[in-house]
Amino acid sequence: MDFSHTPYDEEGSTWRPIPARYGSFLTRRQAELWSLVLDSRSIPCCVKAIGSDWQLLVPEAHFDSACNELHLYEEKNRDWPPRLPPSRSLIENTLPTVSVLILLATFQIGRASCRERV
C-alpha cells in the first residue's frame, strides 16, 4: 500500500482509479479503508491526494478483482455497526422495578425479625 501522491510504476503497468460510490472522488477515510481491504487481499494499490479529494489507484491488471473485492466488502459491512435496540419507556420498567424493590424489602424485614428472635 502506497500513500504517496503519485502512483508507483510496477513493470510499466497503467493505473486506474477505483470509482467512488457517490461522485468521482473518495474521502480520505474511505480511500485508506479501501486500500487496507485491497492490501489484505494482496492487490497492489496507491492512494493519491487531489486537492481535498482522494483517489484509490490499482494496476489495470488488478482492476476487476479490486472492484469485486471492494463490492464484497461493502456488501458484508452494509449495516455495520448494528443499530441499538429500542429503549423501553419508563412506564414499562416501573412494574418490574417496584416488584423487585418490594421483594427485597420483604426479604430484609424477614431477616431483621429473625435476628430479633435469637
Image (cartoon, rainbow, N blue to C red):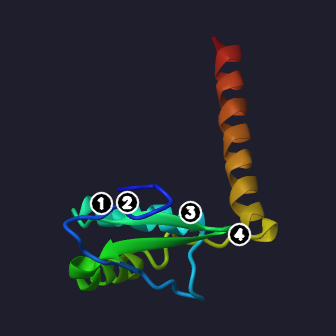
Where is residue 111 drawn, in percent x and y? 65, 26
Measured in 3D between alpha carbons, the distance from the residue under mark 2 to the one under mark 1, in whole angstroms, is: 5 Å
Measured in 3D between alpha carbons, the distance from the residue under mark 2 to the one under mark 4, in whole angstroms, is: 39 Å
- Residues at marks 2 and 1 touching, judged by CB atoms closer than 8 Å: yes
Indicate the amino acid at tag 1: Asp
Q: Residue at x 30, y 64 (%)?
A: 9
Q: Earlier in the sequence, mark 3 or mark 2?
A: 3
Where is residue 52 drawn, in percent x and y? 68, 67
Indicate the amino acid at tag 2: Leu
- Residues at marks 3 and 1 touching, judged by CB atoms closer than 8 Å: no
Nearer mark to the viewer, of 4 and 1: 1
SS category of the residue bearing label 3: helix
Nearer mark to the viewer, of 4 and 3: 3
Q: Residue at x 71, y 69 (%)?
A: 88
Residue pointed to by mark 2: 36
Indicate the amino acid at tag 3: Arg
Residue pointed to by mark 4: 88
- How dense is the environment of label 2, judged by Cα within 10 Å: few (below 14), some, or many (20 and up)? some
Determine whether 97 is above or below 65 in the image: above
- Residues at marks 4 and 1 touching, judged by CB atoms closer than 8 Å: no
SS category of the residue bearing label 2: helix
SS category of the residue bearing label 4: loop
Residue pointed to by mark 3: 29
Determine whether 107 is above or below 59 in the image: above
